[in-house]
Image: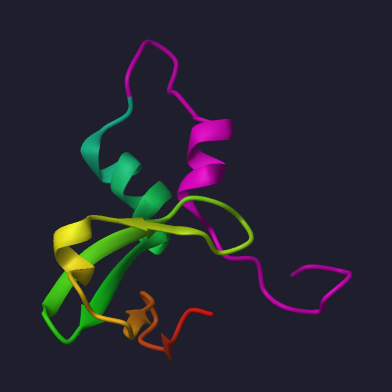
Amino acid sequence: MNKETGRGERKGLWQFLRHPRQREGGMRSLEEVYESIKDAVITVQSHDGDGSGFVVRQDGIVATNRHVVGLSTVVVLVMPLGWRRRPM
């Protein structure tokens, strides 16, 4: 819980990149990597179809591919818990 905002903390890929955790003796398992970044992966919906993206910064910046968005002027981001948001 964030003391300033009163909201729960969201995990993102930026946290994994800044603070990678390794087990003693080497690399992490695929399950450990998945658990550490799964909340950063989102669905990107546009008029041209659906694709994926991921949160790269704590302020909500999302990366995806151009072919996912295509020429659409409106996209909807579907977060792991199911809530949807139109980016500004």
Q: Is residue 26 found left or right of 67 in the rendered image?
A: right
The answer to which image quadrant residue 43 occupies is bottom left
Q: Residue at the location (53% across, 44% down)?
A: 14
The answer to which image quadrant residue 80 occupies is bottom left
Is residue 75 at all visible to an observer of this figure?
yes
Extreme residue in the right direction: 4
Q: Residue at the location (56% across, 52% down)?
A: 57
Extreme residue in the top direction: 25
| Residues drawn in magenta | 1-27
Pick the residue in front: 72 or 24: 72
Expressed as whole percent of the image width and height from the top left, the position of residue 48 reads 11, 80
Q: In the displayed structure, would residue 36 be above or below residue 16?
A: below
Expressed as whole percent of the image width and height from the top left, the position of residue 69 reads 22, 70
Pick the residue in front: 33 or 49: 49
Q: Main secondary structure of the magenta part?
A: loop
How many marks on residues? 0
Q: In the displayed structure, would residue 31 be above or below residue 42?
A: above
Expressed as whole percent of the image width and height from the top left, the position of residue 31 reads 25, 44
Q: Residue at the location (55% across, 64% down)?
A: 60
